[in-house]
Image (cartoon, grey):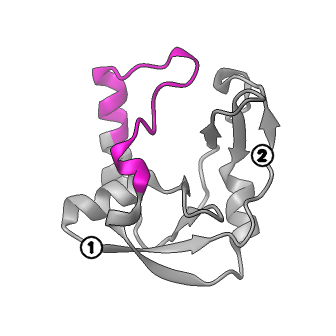
Amino acid sequence: MAVRPQYHFRTSKDGLLAWDVRRLIALSRGLPVKAVALSDIQEVDENHWYGFEGQVPTCRSILAHIALIEQADLSFPILLDAEGRLMDGMHRVCKAIRRGDTHIQAIRFPETPPPDFTGRRPEDLSYD
């Protein structure tokens, strides 16, 4: 299954940090997969998809996320950084919560990989 080009973003004192999710997936190969309680995923109660560079939720963007949640494949583990923060898989997390699951399969990096980009705007990155 090909992964669509996407990035994980975080704000920092150095500007917006961006990780290429395809690289994170490649780096996670061979790491152990463990069940994680969905209640431990902090980002569920945070502004996870919006708020970078003035992004705001619109009905169209919410519908796009709903479609991605419906299509999410729970056979692929989510990715967590070394502190347990989500780096990839919020659509899968939402699907699992919607189904009533209590846990989800996850890979936690022993050390958080360095970002691929610092100080770049999301619209300036390649999505090809």
Q: Residue at x 41, y 19 (%)?
A: 56
Instruction: Residue under label 2, please give it.
Output: 115
Instruction: Residue under label 1, please give it.
Output: 102
The residue most toward the top is 54
Q: Is residue 119 above or below residue 95?
A: above
- How far across and down, in percent of the image, does residue 90 sit? 43, 52
What stretch of residues is rendered in magenta?
Answer: 42-65
Give the residue type at disc 2. Pro
- How far across and down, in percent of the image, does residue 97 sit? 26, 61
- How far across and down, in percent of the image, does residue 55 sit? 48, 19
Q: Which mark is residue 65?
A: none
Foreground residue among 13 and 63: 13
Give the residue type at disc 1. Thr
Quarter of the image for residue 61 reads: top left
Could you tell me which quadrant the N terminus lies in? bottom right
Could you tell me which quadrant the C terminus lies in? top right
Q: Residue at x 76, y 25 (%)?
A: 120
- Residue 5, magenta (yes or no): no
Q: Is residue 55 left or right of residue 123?
A: left
